[in-house]
């Protein structure tokens, strides 16, 4: 069973569900645009850190705020949440869309972020290696593309998607569309990335079908100090295909 | 039904030349390749569709109804105001209904201007309906479905301000800023042409129509649902102090008239089947882009879509929806019964569907005008 303790907070009027485990320095995980497969992999870090996994507004168990129309609204949301949780400095891990959010947070509030881990982050435009347009990809096609070996994900999905599952995904897609339907990419984003000066690890699966692994080098171009770790045989959700990546990330975090 | 009956001809202007392998495509919307569009054939189709609509005017129909769809064989009226402009000099008497342009895909002042131009050109014969636009239109236009309802409300507010307040006025909203809202020309009809909202029955849209005192045209909803919608709409409109007139609740229906019931079915059913199976062939993904539906509506519509599975069944479909096929007597009785039950006197009939040849459309309209309308007018007088 999960070691996580579930807590329900009200952040600026938005119900925010936070799961946490362990004690020590805070380590916050920002999830991606889907919350299908759970966060148990983050428990590995709870031996040395106070691991905190919040659900973003509009995703999973947290409430909705339709006025969130920009990724920056989430940065502001997390400033509030961290005040409530009395977190000053922290390490930050972001997956996919959560990687974009983590990089945003780190570029704006670098003095608070000790270490940054970006796992297949979203947010850069690499014309030669375009990311999959997940908004236009039907769910039944998208889900198997999330990993290299579908068996790694399958047990975490309902056998036949029921209405509840479909509705939950539709709600998360709606939240995502509010942020990215009209402007999937913010062309100004990279120009501020050089402000990410803390030790940074970029993790990418070399079989990523959502955001091609070539994006890793593009991120490194904008964050010159970043270390890049390519995981062989892994897809977009790197840690599902290769759970051992959690230990490698743990080593980087120290 | 009390009051004068009113008869519209509604046309979709479909592009009928589907490639032979079209069944290999899951849908004929959004991403159905436009290499299949042949402009030479398109030209011929416009010729015959315009002929049909001009004929409708001569036959004595009260109005001609146009609508907008994108990226599809379903209709060749991506910009219906262009079609309306071409029809105005040819249509001498009938009203021209653009039902309509989704305001979200236009700048509101520009749409207010276009409609005003059509209204002035036609000497006040324009009627307007405002659709949110189907889900498919949001995949085809650069507009966010997740904020579509807010934007829709704001667009309508701006258009009404443009038409009713003496300009220049200002408007500072969430989506638009107008420092000088002052469109020329202004509509011929005062305060503006008759307005309806078009929808498939989401409570948000009904509430908005009720609030504005607009008519409401429900599309492709089963009879039972349409009945409930009309009742709901009257109640909600009354709540805002508007008494809805019967003509504000147009009844969308499909009709085909022939010499006998058997002949009508033989001539018609194949086209109706193609309409549902091929021309209206969409997908759950296209119908519901993210944020287009509330969670509640998503669940209701998903449940409804399950019921529609199982292929085309004429008997089932014609009893569930407003579809009348048969002799003039049968069709007149059917329509008479609908108008009584629905509390409307406004009959909005689709008389050409899918790949129906020109001659059938002409015959259908002619028999309807000469044999059905007089029966209903006599009965309803």
Image (spheres, rainbow, N blue to C red):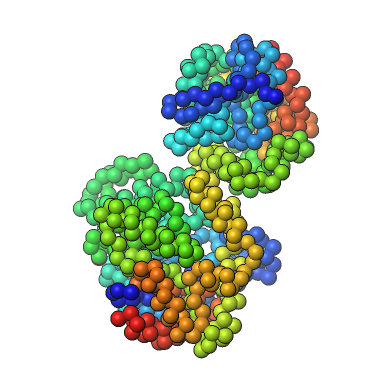
Report the side of B166 relative to A142 (left or right): left
Which image quarter: residue A135?
Answer: top right
Residue furthest to the bottom in view is B259
- In this rendering, does residue B261 appear at all? yes
Q: Position of residue B217 (x, y in %)?
A: 40, 63
Q: How many marks?
A: 0
Which quadrant: the N terminus of chain B? bottom left
Q: Nearer the viewer, residue B223 or B42?
A: B223
Q: Residue at x 53, y 52 (%)?
A: B300
Q: Is residue B62 above or below residue A145?
A: below
Which quadrant: the C terminus of chain B? bottom left
Q: Nearer the viewer, residue A183 or B278?
A: B278
Q: Is residue A112 above or below residue A168?
A: above
Report the side of B248 relative to A102 (left or right): left
Q: Is residue B322 above or below residue B289?
A: below
Q: Is residue A49 above or below residue B128?
A: above
Q: Nearer the viewer, residue B187 or A126?
A: B187
Which image quarter: residue B31?
Answer: bottom right
Q: Position of residue B79 (x, y in %)?
A: 44, 62
Q: Position of residue B260 (x, y in %)?
A: 53, 88
Q: Residue at x 60, y 46 (%)?
A: A163
Q: Residue at x 46, y 25 (%)?
A: A10
Which image quarter: residue A38?
Answer: top right
Q: Residue at x 41, y 87 (%)?
A: B371
Q: Position of residue B355 (x, y in %)?
A: 57, 75
- In this rendering, does residue B359 appear at all? no
Residue furthest to the top in view is A24
């Amino acid at each position: 069973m999960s070691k996580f303790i579930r807590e329900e907070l009200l952040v600026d009027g938005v119900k925010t569900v936070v799961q946490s485990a362990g004690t020590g320095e805070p380590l916050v995980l920002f999830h991606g645009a889907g919350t299908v497969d759970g966060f148990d992999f983050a428990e590995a870090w709870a031996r040395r850190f106070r691991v905190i996994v919040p659900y973003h507004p509009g995703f999973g168990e947290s409430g909705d705020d339709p006025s969130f129309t920009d990724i920056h609204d989430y940065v502001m949301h997390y400033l509030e949440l961290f005040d409530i949780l009395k977190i000053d400095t922290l390490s930050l891990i972001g997956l996919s869309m959560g990687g974009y959010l983590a990089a945003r947070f780190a570029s704006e509030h670098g003095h608070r972020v000790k270490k940054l881990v970006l796992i297949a982050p979203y947010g850069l435009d690499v014309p030669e290696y375009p990311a999959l347009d997940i908004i236009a990809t039907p769910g039944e096609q998208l889900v198997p593309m999330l990993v290299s070996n579908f068996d790694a994900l399958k047990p975490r999905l309902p056998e036949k998607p029921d209405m509840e599952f479909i509705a939950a995904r539709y709600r998360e897609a709606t939240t995502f569309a509010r942020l990215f339907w009209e402007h999937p990419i913010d062309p100004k984003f990279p120009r501020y990335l050089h402000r990410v000066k803390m030790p940074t690890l970029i993790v990418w699966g070399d079989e990523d079908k959502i955001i091609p692994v070539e994006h890793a080098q593009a991120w490194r171009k904008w964050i010159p100090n970043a270390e890049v770790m390519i995981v062989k045989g892994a897809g977009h959700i790197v840690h599902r295909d290769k759970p051992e990546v959690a230990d490698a990330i743990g080593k980087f975090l120290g | 039904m009390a009051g004068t009956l009113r008869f519209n001809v509604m046309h979709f202007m479909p592009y009928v030349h589907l490639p032979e392998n079209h069944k290999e495509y899951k849908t004929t919307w959004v991403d159905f390749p436009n290499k299949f569009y042949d402009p030479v054939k398109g030209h011929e189709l416009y010729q015959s569709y315009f002929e049909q609509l001009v004929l409708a005017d001569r036959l004595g129909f009260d109005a001609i109804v146009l609508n907008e769809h994108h990226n599809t064989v379903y209709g060749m009226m991506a910009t219906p105001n262009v079609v309306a402009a071409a029809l105005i000099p040819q249509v001498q008497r009938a009203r021209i209904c653009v039902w309509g342009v989704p305001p979200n895909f236009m700048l509101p002042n520009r749409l207010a201007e276009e409609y005003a131009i059509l209204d002035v050109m036609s000497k006040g014969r324009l009627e307007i309906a405002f659709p949110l636009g189907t889900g498919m239109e949001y995949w085809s236009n650069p507009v966010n479905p997740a904020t579509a309802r807010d934007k829709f409300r704001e667009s309508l507010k701006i258009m009404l301000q443009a038409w009713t307040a003496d300009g220049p006025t200002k408007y500072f909203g969430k989506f638009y800023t107008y420092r000088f809202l002052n469109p020329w020309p202004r509509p011929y009809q005062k305060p503006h042409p008759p307005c309806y909202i078009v929808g498939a029955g989401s409570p948000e849209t009904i509430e908005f129509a009720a609030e504005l005192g607009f008519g409401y045209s429900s599309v492709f909803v089963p009879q039972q649902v349409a009945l409930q919608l009309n009742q709901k709409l009257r109640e909600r409109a009354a709540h805002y102090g508007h008494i809805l007139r019967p003509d504000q609740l147009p009844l969308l229906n499909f009709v085909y008239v022939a010499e006998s019931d058997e002949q009508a079915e033989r001539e018609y059913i194949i086209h109706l089947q193609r309409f549902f199976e091929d021309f209206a062939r969409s997908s759950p993904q296209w119908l519901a882009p993210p944020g287009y539906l509330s969670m509640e509506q998503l669940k209701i519509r998903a449940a409804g879509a399950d019921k529609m599975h199982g292929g085309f069944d004429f008997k089932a479909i014609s009893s569930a929806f407003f579809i009348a096929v048969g002799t003039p007597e049968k069709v007149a009785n059917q329509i008479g019964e609908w108008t009584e039950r629905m509390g409307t006197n406004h009959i909005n009939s689709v008389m050409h569907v899918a790949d129906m040849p020109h001659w059938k459309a002409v015959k259908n309209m002619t028999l309807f005008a000469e044999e059905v309308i007089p029966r209903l007018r006599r009965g309803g007088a």
